[in-house]
Amino acid sequence: MKLGILSKKRERTIMRQHAQGPILWNRAKKIIPGGNQLLSKRSEMFLPDLWPAYYSKAKGCEVWDLEGQRYYDFAQMGVGSCILGYADEDVNRAVIDTIQKGSMCSLNCPEEVELAKRLVSLHPWAHMVRFARTGGEACAIAIRIARRFTGKDKVAFCGYHGWHDWYLSSNLGDQSNLDGQLLPGLDPKGVTRTLKNTSFPFGYNNLKELEKIIYDNPGEIGAIIMEPVRNHNPQKGFLEGARKVADKIGAVFIFDEVTSGFRVNLGGIHLTYDVTPDMAVFGKALGNGFPISAIVGKREVMDAAQESFISSTFWTERIGFVAALVTLSKMREKRVQKKLVQYGKEINQGWIDAARASDLKITISGIQPLTHISFNHPEALALQTFYAQEMLKKGFLVGASVYSTFAYTPEIIKEFIAATREVFLQIRERLSRGGSIVHYLDGPIKHEGFKRLT
């Protein structure tokens, strides 16, 4: 497709109903509880009833739906996992070779040791690594190790750390405990009530809340786990203060870098803040779309894993290790992080300029390679839905966040910004007529967080 602003003919082509995707999604909700395996991929999180929902092919930063329509992905890029782009040829070549040689065996694969060595070399404070396949389970492993090491059950946390019982149990005490951590409305039904008052949230940049948790649970907090950064930069002394609190009470200090890892630098973003954890958890971008996660830590803490049963067959399959090794090598060779930061800056500036030109109020948050936009308006969710709706017609998958990928080009980003400017002007024109922006939606308003679908 020729770059530049999409032609009216192309736009009209995309405007037709994406029948196969929505039909299949509605069918899926009847036979798969929740429709799929990941909240972040639900159509209701973007454009209910109209989102393409399924793909037939993905390459670079382009996605083809079931009807062959092509889009640029400015929504999630595989929920942040495809840092190099979809179907990267170097990674795929290594994976295909691995499959031909056998991806699973009764013996261990040597790449497991090589990847552990590579991750330790990137984090000078660390000595040992354990592996899993998803971010949530890696966080759960880190908590298990921390509890064994300290002999203490309770956890203080800040940020989003997955679906496991130790985390969701926070909402047993107060149904809204997790609302400020990323996803509102997370329901702890099915989590044993014996875990009530074992996990406690504190706000980002709020040391006083962390200190109150410690005061209210004297001698009982065994782990402090937090995302070093997500929506906002840490205030001076915040990360350092949390580290000091952990030292003071003898808790294991854990950075969850499942989302932030490898986007700003080749390693954990905590390295840029010069604050050393006892463990750090990585996932998403590590394997460029192939399942692999890692828990990196200090020897004295990690060794406690040998005194707790932590074991799974598919944590040993070969593909994830191979994919991660190639991904790390390509990140270094191509200086991928520099490009991700640059692209994030350009996207942010494009949003700012488009909002200024259309007299819209927006807020931009997050690290530059993972940037988030929100509309400062009473109908914020409806405006976000309209933005996704109209950008889809122009050939872009758009959500509230953009995970930058090395597969973007300056030309593609310029096209994205030009299309955004047009849609923002559309929003301003419709708001100027009075009434609700909802009248201009072709379907329902997007969901903000977790909800039952059927």
Image (cartoon, rainbow, N blue to C red):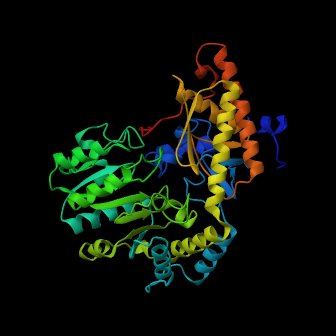
Query: Is residue 18 at all visible to an observer of this figure?
Result: no
Q: Residue at x 36, y 63 (%)?
A: 277
State whether residue 132 is above or below residue 427: below
Q: Is 314 left or right of 95, judged from the image as shown?
A: left
Residue 438 screen position, x and y as percent: 58, 22
Which quadrant of the rendered structure holds the C terminus?
Answer: top left
Relative to 428, residue 29 above or below: below
Query: Within the image, what quadrant is residue 296 found in?
Result: bottom left
Q: Residue 416: where, in percent of width, then height?
A: 72, 42
Q: Quadrant of residue 356?
A: top right
- Where is residue 256? Give x, y as percent: 40, 58
Q: Nearer the viewer, residue 385 or 257?
A: 257
Closest to the observer, 185 or 249: 249
Left/right placement of residue 255 relative to residue 405 reads left
Asked if one can make out residue 360 in the rendered structure from this viewpoint, the answer is yes
Residue at the far left in the pictured view: 218
The percent coordinates of residue 375 (x first, y second) are 56, 30
